[in-house]
Each structure stands twice: as structure tokens, then as C-alpha cells.
Image (cartoon, rainbow, N blue to C red):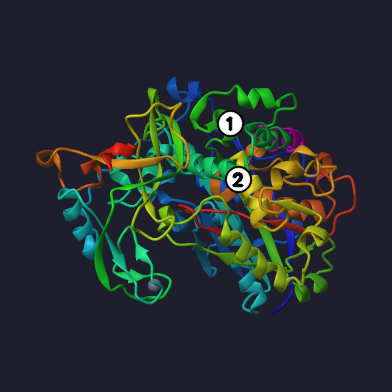
Amino acid sequence: MRKVGVIGAGMTLFRRRLQETGKEMCFEATKMALDSAGLTRADIDMVVNGTAPDAFDGVHMKGEYLLDGCGGYRKPYTRVFTGGGTGVFSSIAGWWHVASGLADAVLVVNEEKMSSCQPHPQSVFAHIWDPILDRPLRPNLVWIFAMEMNRYMHVHGVKKEDIARVAVKNKRNAVGHPCAQLADPKITVDDVLNSEVMAWPVQRLDISPPSDGASAIVLASEDFIRRRKIKDRAWMSGVGWCIDSTMWTDRDLYFPEYVARAAQTAYKRAKISDPRREIDFAEPYDPFDYKELHHLEGLLLAKKGEAPILTREGVTERDGDLPVCPSGGLMGVGNPIAATMGQKIGELFWQLTNQAGKRQIPHEVHTGVAQAWGDLMPLWW
Amino acid sequence: MTQRITKWPGVELSAADLNEGKVTQTRFRPNAKYAWSAGEAMSRFLAELQNGRLIARTCRSCKRILFPPRMFCEVCFRPTDEWTYIQDTGTIETFSISYLDTDAKRIPDPILVGVVSLDGASPKMGMMHYFGDMTKDEIRIGMRVKAVWKPWEERRGSVLDIRHFGPLRKDAK
Ligand SMILES: [Zn+2]
């Protein structure tokens, strides 16, 4: 396998509703990523697109619909889709294009335009459930998170205050992010605890709401990076992905075993034996505040039930020992599902190349981990 | 990024921009309809629901009693072996008190919903369903529950043949 580096990144604003079409958003993010790498479309061998359910945009086969905006014209082009996991998984697909030797330079472009779906994208989330077992109960997607959060809280005796701290941290971290939809420098734990109850234990400020946005990265081989004398690069030293059973009512929801397996694969590839000591910061997937904690434990960066304690002690603050979601995450920057690659892989690149501006972690960092999760209960890394 | 970039792309629209027709839009309402074949395992499962019973499949290889029933074991990756009835009693594994309906509309009276693991199936195996005959203050993880079935003539071969799971009273067996 060849060594692969991230050499450019770009993203649009994340907003409840953007005027641009999906294609136009992709073009903007892609152009920004190419510019930041000092490349043009002619330098790109292959293109990967990541985007979540077609039903949001209302365009079936939307990978094809978006391809011109992704720089895919007359190139080998693939769309990958793993639900919310697409936010990181499309970069893994880009990685294998380069690591295998098939391509020297690859664009990865992720897009989501959830505002097109009326009156609320929640109505198409109804179509992800099993048609026989689940759908007659008319489930709402938030139920899944509420049930998982409740189980997690129950098993470890976690208090809602400690979960709310994640929302506060990430919305404050996002203040330094130029694309953020949900930054709030003044938010407090009480604001989260007093927000409207949606599906207990989930309250309004525990959730990252729907959004429009696009993000893009450029990946290249070590040889290409050396030849072009590219200075700003972050190496992808390990990747892993894993999925659980679709029989989600058959397992204990308190711990994401699939994340642990994906993480172990990635750590092994990256020759990391003690992740807590060797990893300097993390961008776990945080569509809900408790999910950051759940995923930190899955990533083996905290013991089971320990993530809320680390959060309470300030370890996961930007200036803490293990900064978590220094970008502001989904909770602070926004959640246009696949496009959250901008806060995950994009943020790793910006932090590791010292380009994160106001969000830069104040101490030196060398190794970061990003993770996303998607589909009914399963996940990726 | 970030120091070098001064303009971040994207033009934000407000709800008013849309409602007042300030932006050009085009609309479409899809008309897609589906009729799913329930398949082997679920057809039997649904027929048994109409009889007021819950049925599972066994796997001789991993010794699990699989619920919801399935025709192949995803762990051993072989066909499952036999049908077996399980009980309609179980334990609440987790739950939510939902003030959102399926379309994310707010509802004043919350829905109690969660996962119940069923007696007679392998540990932790169960299904999602509603909970009833209890208040939002009474529901808790670990609570023992029993299916409350619709009357026979109202059953349709659906998970909704169970109205909800209600508290299991000790005197009722
Ligand atoms: Zn088996």
C-alpha cells in the first residue's frame, strides 16, 4: 500500500437553507480544495462523491446529478453512500484509490441539501426503517438516538448535565469556524437542559438540526506530493470501517462495538498501540451531544463510561489534554450529513497543517482521529 | 483554511425568502407506492401475531433463539433450523418519551416507545414497540412488561396487532 496524504480542503457555509443547488455547492467546495492544494482539475485522476439519501435532494441517483460540480466530467467517478458514515467513509474510498496505486491524485466531494425536502427532511427519514417490523409504528428518527442515549445513561449512570457539556463545548468551539451555523459563545449547560424536550432524553439543544452544505478534499500519493513540492499535507496513516447487524433490537445499545472494531483496524494499520497516549486530538461524529461520548468510548480514547468524566474535567476542551471536536463538530458547525467531512477530515488537515486559525489547538499536535457513523445503527471510521 | 481564504461560498436564504416568493423555486410531489412481499420469516411471524403469539427461529450452531425470526443466521451464516414460540412478556431495555410524531410535528401527549427484550428468546433479543397503561413518570428501564393484544377481530397480521406493552402484574402469572 502506498502512503496517502490530504493536501487540500474546502467547504461552503453550512446553513439551514442555501440558495445554491447541490451542483453549485459542490463546485464551490471543490474549487476551494483544488486551489488550496495548488492544483487544477487536470491534475486529478479520479473523483469520489459522497452524499446521503437521494430522498433529501429529491433526485434519484444524485451521485450522477452532482458529478459536474464535483469535477467528475470525463473522469473515473464513484459515489459512495453509508448514511451519516459517508462523512468519513468517502475519504476512505479516496484513500484506497491512491493507496492501491490506481490513482496519484483524487478529489473527494461530499454534499447534502436537506432543505429541498418539504416540510421537513424528517419525513423521508421515515423511509429508512424496516417496512414490516418498524414502519407500522410510524417511528421518528430521533427515537433511535433517544433510545440509545437512554440506554447509555442508564448503564453508566450518566447525568444529562454531563452530556449537555458536549453541546456547550462544541457550540463554543464553532465560534472560530467561518462556516458555522450553530456557534454560540454564550451558551450554558442550563440552556441545553432547559431547551424543549423532543423525545426524552433528547432535548432540542442536544441535536444538530438539518443543514445544506458541501465539502471537498484532495488526496495524493507520497510520490505526487514530493514531485509537486507540496508542503501542507496530513498523512492518512490508518483507516478502518465496520458495520453491525441490521437486527438492531437484538443488541445492547450502550456501547458501539462496531466503532471499536473499526478503530482497532485503523490503529493497527497506523501502528498505534496505545490510542489514548498516541492520539493528540479527535473529531468523532457528534450529530447528538451524547454521540461524541459514545464514540469516544468506541474509539478506545476513553474507558466505558469514562467519556462524560473526561468532558466534565475539561480534558476534551480545545486546550485540554485530548481536544475533541476542536472544529465545533456537527453540534456547532452544522449537520449536512455527508458534507460533515469538512469538520472531520477537513479539520484534521487544517489542524495538522497549522491552518485552523482561531480554532488552532494551542499546543503542538501530530496525530488526530476522525470518525463518522451512519445507517440505522451501524458505523464507520 | 483559513487565514488565506477570505470569502466562504454560500448564500443563506431565510424562511421568509421562500414563503414570500423572493427566490425562484420549482416543486414536485413524488407519487411512489410500494407493496412489499413479507418474505418467509416475516410472513409466518405476522400470521402468528394474528393468532396472538410471538414466534422465533432457532440456530443449532450458535444455540441462539432468534427474534425477530429469520431464515438464516447472520453470525453462523447458515439456514436457521426450527420455529419456536416465545412468550409475550419481557423487559424494557430502553425507551423514549417522544413529543415528536413521525413527521417531527409536536404532539402534546407523548408517545412511550422503546425496545423490549422478550422472554424465551436469547438475551437482549426483542423488538421496538409502544408502551402503555403506565405514565411517563412510571416507565423505567428494567420494567417487566406484557403484550396487550388487540381483540382478535381487529388483528391484521401486523406488529400493530399488539396495541402496546403494558406493566406485567405478578398476580397475572
Ligand atoms: Zn447461528
What's the residue type where badge 1 is placed? Glu
Whether residue A92 sits left or right of residue A359 in the image: it is left
Q: Which residue is drawn at 63% across and 27% down?
A: A192
Q: Which of marks 1 and 2 is in front?
A: 2
User: What residue sits 45% from the left and 39% below the top?
Assistant: B95
Q: Would you call the spot at circle 1 few (<14 residues within 10 Å), some (14-19), or many (20 or more)?
A: some
Picture quadrant of residue A233: bottom right
Question: In the current view of this chain or complex, which residue is farthest to the left?
Answer: B153
Give the x, y percent position of residue B77: 39, 75
Q: Indicate the secondary structure of the residue bearing disc 1.
A: loop
Q: In this view, does B88 lie above or below A259?
A: above
Residue A281 picture location, percent across and down: 78, 52
* Amino acid marked by disc 2: Lys
Q: Left of B32 or right of it: where is B123?
A: right
Between B28 and A239, the residue placed more toward the observer is A239
Q: Residue A291 carries which label?
A: 2
Range of magenta residues: A170-182
What residue is pinned by disc 1?
B12
Q: Could you say which is closer to the camera, residue A318 or residue B154?
A: B154
Q: In the visual, does A341 lie left or right of A18?
A: right
Residue A302 x, y percent position in the rendering = 72, 53
Residue A119 placed where, x, y %? 39, 31
Q: Residue B30 carries which label?
A: none
Q: Nearer the viewer, residue B24 or A237?
A: A237
Chain identity of mark 1: B
